[in-house]
Image (tube, rainbow, N blue to C red):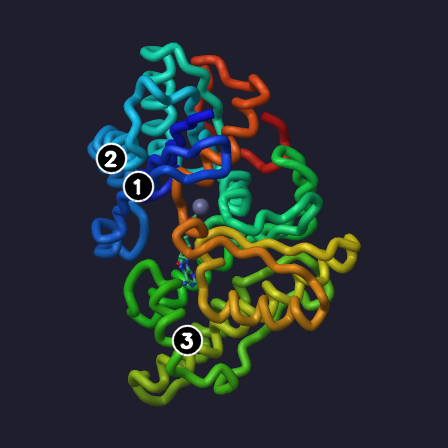
Amino acid sequence: MLVLGIESSCDETAASVVSDGVKILSNVIASQVNIHSRYGGVVPEVASRHHIEAIIPVIGEALKGAGVSIGDIEGIAVTRGPGLIGSLLVGVSVAKSIAFARNLPCVGVNHIAGHIGALFLIENVPAFPFVSLVVSGGHTHIYKVDNYDRFTLLGQTRDDAAGEAFDKAAKMMNLGYPGGVIIDTMAKKGDPGKIDFPRAMKKSTDFSFSGLKTALLNYLKTLNHFPGQEDICDIAASFQDAIVDVLVEKTLRAAEESCISRVALSGGVASNTRLRKVFMEESAKKGIELFIPPPLLCTDNAAMIAAIGSQYLEKGISDALDMNAVSRWPLGSGR
Ligand code: KG4
Ligand code: ZN
């Protein structure tokens, strides 16, 4: 089955053509990062307007890149939520319009399920059940994944998401937006043992990153000189390690407590170099099999939405044309 995936939940306008839910024929992503970086974060109203401008050309490019025409497409999968409502509405409206015009089935996909869906697009697909950490700008959740549509929450952040913590830390140090990639790069030149940042809620599989953010703010205040390049690299490395340590430890513990020996990572922060390395080392020590998509499938894309949507569409499940976008949609709370 040839499925067109559409994703517009935040600041990336994306479209992809996926065959049989596993083979990516095209994966086009138009990023608005340069537009939002001058504001230090995503401005929802600006994001919606740019999605409107980009969505049709992006879909056209995805079809062209896959070497197919719209007449070849057999179903549409679109991110319905969670995300910025104005941004989601653009993707959902376009998906429903194409479905109506072409008489195609259209299914709304949960964005977090989509991030997990990226794992079905890699060569070595994890068998069910597996434990998945979804770690992005809006989510830090651990799920037990029993099937394409069966997710049990094992742990989640009580405040900020890990990606949000990276972005806020970069903002505090005037490093630019989005902060995750910048901190990842600077941390490579820094000493992770230089500052002892807190690791919160050690015994739980839930996360908390707000104390870490405050600890960084306090550290910057107590520094009796303007931080130079070397200081910033040490801070970045120490801050990054505080996040990586808890993500790795809690996810592997959640897997052990569930007696599951397969662990997967997804979401934008899963492209972090240090996180991937530490996860590989620690899972190997524990005899846990680790699955991580390539960085391009970790950050927001439409191939992951098509991967999950294909599973529904192939079973004949689709949504009516009165389907609407939803800003909040906890995974596992139904369709
Ligand atoms: O999954 P994603 O593209 O969008 C959301 O659904 O949120 O994730 C974006 C988040 C941002 O917070 C960004 O700073 C973070 O992922 N991120 C990273 C890296 N690349 C992206 N964080 C740490 N290291 C990276 N290499
Ligand atoms: Zn995302």
* Residue type, label 1: Val
Rendered location of residue 253, percent (x, y): 72, 62
Q: Is residue 333 left or right of residue 8?
A: right
Q: Which mark is first along the chain, 2 or 3?
A: 2
Residue 3 visible in the shown view: yes
> Residues under labels 3 and 2: Cα distance?
38 Å
Q: Is mark 1 within 8 Å of ligand 1?
A: no
> Which numbered dot is residue 28?
1
In this view, the residue in front, 288 or 322, is 288
Disc 2/disc 1 C-alpha distance (Å):
7 Å
> What's the CA distance linking mark 3 and mark 1?
31 Å
Residue 164 spot, x, y in % from top left: 44, 57
The residue where tag 2 is placed is: 61
Q: Is mark 3 within 8 Å of ligand 1?
A: no
Give me the disc on residue 288. none
Q: Residue at x 52, y 18 (%)?
A: 318
Task: Report the residue marked by disc 3.
Answer: 236
**Callout 2 touching callout 1 (CB < 8 Å):** yes
Give the residue at x 58% y 37%.
330
